[in-house]
Amino acid sequence: MGQTYDKARTFAATHKKMLIAIVSAVLGVLFVLSILLSIFADGEFSSDDADTGTKGIIRLNDTTYNTSYFAGDKCSFDKENASITLGAKDNVLDKVVRVDDLPAPEYGFMVNGQGDIIYEPDQITMTQDVKTIDVVSKVYPDVRETIDVSVYGALDADKLTDTVKIEAEDADLYYDGKLLTQEEKAAQPNTESPFLANVGNPGTGYDPELLSGGNCLRNFQKNDMRVDFMIASSENATVELTISVCMRTSAQTFGSCYAFELNGQTVTAADNINVPKGRGYFTPYDIKIDIELVRGINTLSFSSGNSIGKNNPFNFDAISVTADRAIIAGMDAVGAVSYTHLRAHETLSDL
């Protein structure tokens, strides 16, 4: 067996260039097959509907665009620096066409999946009727990728400030994916030890005057929990975020208790910050990091629970966001949302 292994290793070393070429060819074939699979799978393409349109996929590889807008904003999509892959079954050429880096003039946008292709994003004015922006191939207009967008009412400039503080007890709290009401926060998972700290119950053993707002969220334990805070910003900006949590009876890092996402993107800047040991479970401790807000509505999400390996997290007191000028506000400064991102879209990376 040792001789067989030595022969195989010698062969691989001797024919390295040939093997690399073979592997590269196989990978290329597999990519084309993945496109074909997406086209023909589940009866999506057959002889009966061959003339109804081109089947294919657009993949947004490395693109920068907004999904949150205020009414009256222009659509924001960086075509100059975007990287987009196109895969399509060309009915005329009767072959799969693949373009790894689709040139900017070769694609545009459709509003709500209909109408003419618009090639410059800033020609689209976002109103509360806009629910989706489709990235559309110029040559194959049936091939597109949909971006769900949220369009809010106009931002009240008079309410803009440089500091916004939100108490955790006023934030959106999700338990196993379900948004809880204020009444449910005070009763689940049980009335004796609910998620919302009971300041009137001496059995909790803490001084509410120590807590911001006199309250906090607690008792998450192994339950799958998520706390969402929403901040409006009138422009893209770097701001200071203060996360106020409560010390526990042993020191722990923030990342061992919570996973932090900003607008759906993981933020690790606070992960290794140590929260020292406290005398109980209700003494606040402030963590400060810089984050990047975008123009629109920014969602700061803190998750814990058994499903992500972050059990028994710190009690959560509040967050505070500070900018160097009056550009941010709470949701009371924003009109109603017309649409919320709810669905995921298949891309080439899913194949």
Image: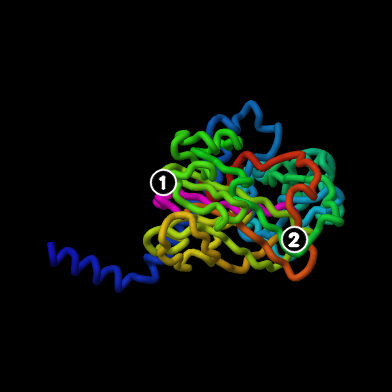
Find out whether residue 10 is within the magenta segment.
no
- Horizontally, residue 64 falls left or right of residue 266, namely right
Q: Which mark is residue 126?
A: none
In space, the residues marked 2 and 1 are separated at their CA atoms by: 45 Å
- Residue stretch rendered in magenta on the structure: 296-314
Residue beneath the point at 75% across and 64% down: 162
Left or right: 120 as drawn, with respect to 197 = right
Question: In the displayed structure, would residue 294 be above or below residue 348?
Answer: below
Question: Going 42% across and 52% down the picture, which residue do you hit?
Answer: 310
- The x, y position of residue 212, in whole percent, is 60, 56
At 69% from the left and 61% from the top, the residue drawn is 293
Which of the colour schemes (rainbow, by chain, secondary structure, one colour) is used? rainbow
- The residue pinned by badge 1 equals 221
Viewer-side residue, 162 vs 84: 162
SS state under label 1 = loop
Where, by quadrant of the figure, is residue 74 drawn? bottom right
Does any portion of residue 98 appear in the rendered image? no
Q: Is residue 160 visible?
A: yes
For discs 2 and 1, the disc positioned in front in the rendered view: 1
Mark 2 lies on residue: 79
Amino acid bearing label 1: Gln
Q: Position of residue 348 (x, y in %)?
A: 56, 49
Q: Position of residue 323 (x, y in %)?
A: 72, 67
**Crowding near the residue tagged with mark 2, few <14, some 14–19, many ≥20 C-alpha atoms within 10 Å:** some
- Label 2 vs 1, first from the N-terminus: 2
**Amino acid type of disc 2?**
Lys
| Neighbour tally class for label 1: few under 14, some 14-19, many 20 plus, Cα within 10 Å | some
Residue nearer the viewer, 221 or 278? 278
Work out which residue is located at the far front of the displayed protein and give it: 202
Left or right: 229, with 17 as reference point: right
**In-image side of 6 versus 98 (left or right):** left
